[in-house]
Image (cartoon, rainbow, N blue to C red):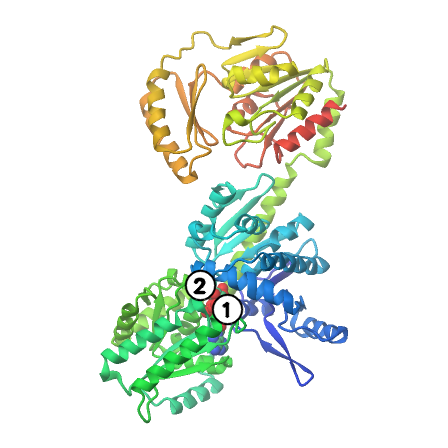
């Protein structure tokens, strides 16, 4: 048994579709057997060691309440498991239906096999809710919840809604496909939102992580910054954790008496020089037919290997209720029959096909005896078989691994023979190459790969994930302290009430109203206007709207409230008492616009969805509606170009939130704020609210005692407090206006 590396103090609660064991009824007796598949076999080592609680489906439906209680007691007492029972309808729609007919094929790049059915989707949501309710029965505040895989994609957000402070990790065991594939899913936004309920989301490879980011960006419009997605009220960390195996359990078993015995039996059954092996769940994604074709081609082209080699094709039964799987099984059996029919002679079986689950000892005997492993899935999240084979070969020392470039494990196992699983000739070629590699070379390759497998074993993997989850939770807890709620909010309200002189500096877009694709579309709703008017009507208040917008917009929509205003980031100021706009700086020029405007036009032509906004002394290039990646790329190009051209002038180029802005350098919201700050002192109440980089200039010039609030969480701000959304800002202002 491999040695785990760390003691955890917190309880881990695992939620996965299946429990690591399957309950079966045999002549009225309850029996327990290990569940098949990578998630169950891989995670159960961690579960046993950690004594975590595992919540999942036990593989059976109890006949009555008595049997239900019996199963619950057995699982809790002997296995630390809590069953979620699923009836036949749920199993059919949620598991075979949405999980395995829609998600599995789509995520493995077989969109033509995916079928989308509204009832399946509905049941998928209901079963995720069922898991959520089951978790809520047992969860404590301090638990670390670890949700697994594609059957439970909605569970993180469902749990977050019910238990906002829960610490939730999610790991996807299958590939996350490219955005072009993922977006075929009718319920893609719901799925992403479901996953983002977690504090930490893990994938096997960086490619899956990258694909996830691009789907979140394109479908939800949320960007990642340094591997985190900012949801405004919290961050979700996304990272890569290549799953390992309990390597010592495999390598340590090779020379044990039961395995030696199995090896001897195997040798008696297969008296050939070389054994080729493959081990898979029988699944459409595993490339089993292609591999058989490659072996047939090998026998065709290399008669010298006849009678000297056997291919052991081991398939574990899986999802036999699905038509495509049953069909695949008969195709495999037909092809095995054809190959054996063509080449078999007395005393030699070219393909030994086994359709069953094997004991651990038998499996290790096969792994250690096989001269070449063909691990050629068309797509595979990780593929643990490749690692199990190498662990056994670390002792046997004679094997060669042929591995698909589209298996997640290919990212770590570069010393194997990497093939394109759709190219039959490439697999045939790899068999030939593998059989001719000199012993020392084989050994060196295995040793290198095993060293990595040994180091990053399943315990390290789980420990790494858990450590990151705890960090994510700490970050969330720390940031939560700075959200203006409860005590801090009450303190602000009390200070407001006590003050006889108050200054309120309020940004507009993204602060009082939500950001829109086209700036012209943003209109304050009635409530915002009313709140501003009410606040302004209080003689103790001076309310200033401090915006990057032009004068006309602000006058048109907001002058009726009677507030003071700042336009174009401080170029223009409007004091309601005087009733007119005036320039803050004398001598500003707009001559430069004639030469900069055509450059912006070129960028607009090359970036569909972008547009230019002309202000009296500034130009802004907005790209909120452009394809996000293209927009970012062009914006950086534009900023680079403008900065080099405008060096030495008194203009400033700013890259903001989906906008590049060129404005006089002397102008800023900070400078404009001084016009009102002059009239307050340290006893007065000052509140400033903003959401982006231009507001940082304002935060910077405010005195210590000011309430500086940013909308949306960020680590890089001069603000001291956060609010989640414009809705929260208006909520706060409304509460002040009512005092
Ligand atoms: P699977 O698709 O199930 O897992 P894999 O990672 O290869 O694929 O795991 C299969 C497991 O089943 C291995 O532990 C293997 O030993 C065992 N197994 C297979 N055939 C067997 C047999 N006949 N008898 C006994 N045991 C057998 C999913 C993803 C993978 C990902 C894992 C873990 O599809 O890509 O690697 O989860 O994240």
Q: How many marks?
A: 2
Residue carrying label 2 = 382
Q: Residue furthest top?
A: 578
Q: Residue at x 27, y 69 (%)?
A: 425
Ligand 1 closer than 8 Å to label 2 CB: yes
Q: Residue at x 61, y 34 (%)?
A: 725
Choose between 263 and 102: the one closer to the eye. Answer: 102
Q: Is residue 246 visible?
A: no
Q: Position of residue 452 (x, y in %)?
A: 41, 64
Neighbour tally class for label 1: few under 14, some 14-19, many 20 plus, Cα within 10 Å = some
Q: Is residue 429 visible?
A: yes
Q: First in sequence: mark 1 or mark 2?
A: 1
Quadrant where the C terminus is found in the figure: top right
Choose between 30 and 364: the one closer to the eye. Answer: 30
**Secondary structure category for the residue under label 1:** helix
In space, the residues marked 1 and 2 are separated at their CA atoms by 9 Å
Is the residue 622 above or below the residue 13 in the image?
above
Question: Tag on residue 38?
Answer: 1
Ligand 1 closer than 8 Å to label 1 CB: yes
Is the residue 377 above or below the residue 676 in the image?
below
Q: Position of residue 176 (x, y in %)?
A: 46, 55
Quarter of the view holding residue 438: bottom left
Q: Position of residue 545 (x, y in %)?
A: 59, 19
């Amino acid at each position: 048994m491999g040695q785990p590396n760390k003691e955890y103090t917190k309880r881990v609660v695992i939620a996965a579709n299946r429990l690591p064991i399957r309950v079966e009824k045999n002549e009225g007796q309850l029996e327990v057997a290990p569940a098949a598949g990578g998630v169950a076999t891989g995670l159960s080592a961690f579960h046993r060691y950690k004594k975590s609680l595992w919540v999942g489906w036990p593989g059976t439906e109890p006949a009555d309440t008595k049997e239900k209680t019996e199963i619950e007691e057995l699982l809790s007492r002997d296995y630390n498991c809590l069953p979620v029972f699923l009836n036949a309808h749920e199993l059919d729609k949620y598991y075979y239906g949405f999980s395995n007919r829609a998600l599995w094929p789509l995520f493995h790049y077989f969109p033509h096999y995916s079928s989308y059915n509204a009832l399946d989707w509905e049941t998928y949501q209901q079963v995720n809710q069922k898991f959520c309710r089951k978790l809520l029965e047992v969860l404590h505040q301090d638990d670390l919840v670890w949700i697994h895989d594609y059957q439970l994609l909605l569970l993180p957000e469902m749990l977050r809604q019910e238990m906002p402070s829960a610490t939730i990790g999610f790991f996807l065991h299958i590939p996350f496909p490219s955005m072009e594939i993922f977006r075929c899913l009718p319920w893609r936004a719901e799925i992403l939102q479901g996953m983002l309920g977690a504090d930490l989301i893990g994938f096997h490879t960086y490619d899956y992580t990258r694909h996830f980011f691009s789907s979140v960006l394109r479908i939800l419009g949320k960007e990642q910054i340094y591997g985190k997605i900012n949801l405004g009220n919290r961050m979700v960390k996304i990272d890569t954790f290549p799953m390992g195996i309990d390597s010592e359990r495999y390598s340590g078993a090779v020379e044990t008496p039961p395995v030696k015995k199995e090896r001897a039996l195997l040798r008696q059954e297969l008296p050939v020089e070389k054994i080729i092996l493959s081990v898979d769940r029988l699944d459409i994604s595993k490339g089993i037919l292609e591999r058989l074709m490659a072996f047939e081609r090998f026998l065709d082209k290399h008669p010298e290997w006849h009678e000297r080699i056997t291919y052991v094709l081991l398939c574990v039964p899986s999802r036999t209720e699905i038509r495509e799987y049953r069909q695949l099984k008969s195709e495999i059996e037909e092809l095995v029959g054809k190959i054996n029919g063509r080449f078999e002679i007395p005393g030699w079986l070219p393909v030994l096909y086994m359709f069953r689950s094997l004991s651990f000892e038998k499996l290790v005997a096969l792994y250690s005896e096989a001269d070449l492993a063909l691990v050629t899935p068309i797509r595979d999240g990780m593929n643990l078989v490749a690692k199990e084979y190498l662990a056994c070969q670390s002792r046997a020392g004679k094997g060669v691994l042929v591995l698909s470039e589209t298996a997640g494990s290919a990212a770590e196992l570069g010393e194997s023979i990497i093939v394109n699983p759709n190219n039959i000739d490439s697999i045939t070629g790899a068999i030939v190459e593998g059989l001719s590699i000199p012993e020392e070379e084989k050994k060196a390759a295995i040793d290198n790969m095993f060293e990595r497998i040994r180091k990053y074993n399943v315990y390290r993997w789980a420990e790494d994930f858990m450590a990151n989850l705890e960090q994510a939770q700490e970050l969330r807890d720390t940031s939560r302290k700075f959200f203006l709620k409860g005590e801090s909010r009450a303190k602000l309200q009390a200070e407001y009430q006590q003050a006889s002189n108050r200054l309120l500096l309020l940004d507009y877009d993204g602060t009082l109203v939500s950001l829109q694709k086209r700036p012209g579309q943003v209109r304050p709703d009635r409530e915002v206007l009313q709140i501003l008017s009410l606040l302004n009507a209080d003689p103790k208040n001076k309310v200033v709207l401090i915006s990057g917008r032009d004068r006309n917009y602000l006058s048109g929509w907001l002058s009726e409230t009677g507030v003071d205003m700042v336009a174009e980031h401080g170029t223009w100021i409007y004091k309601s008492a005087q009733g007119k706009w005036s320039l803050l700086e004398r001598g500003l020029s707009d001559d430069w616009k004639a030469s900069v405007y055509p450059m912006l036009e070129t960028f607009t032509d090359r970036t569909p969805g972008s547009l230019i906004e002309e202000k009296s002394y500034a130009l802004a290039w907005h790209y909120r509606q452009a394809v996000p990646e293209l927009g970012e790329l062009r914006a950086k190009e534009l900023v680079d170009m403008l900065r080099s051209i405008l060096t030495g002038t008194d203009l400033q180029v700013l890259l903001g939130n989906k906008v590049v802005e060129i404005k006089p350098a002397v102008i800023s919201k900070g400078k404009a704020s001084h016009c009102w700050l002059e009239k307050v002192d340290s006893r007065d109440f000052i509140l400033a609210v903003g959401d982006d980089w231009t507001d940082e200039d304002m935060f910077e010039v405010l005195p210590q005692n000011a309430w500086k609030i940013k909308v949306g969480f960020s680590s890089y701000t001069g603000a001291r407090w956060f609010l989640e959304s414009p809705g929260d800002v208006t909520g706060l202002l409304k509460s002040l206006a009512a005092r």
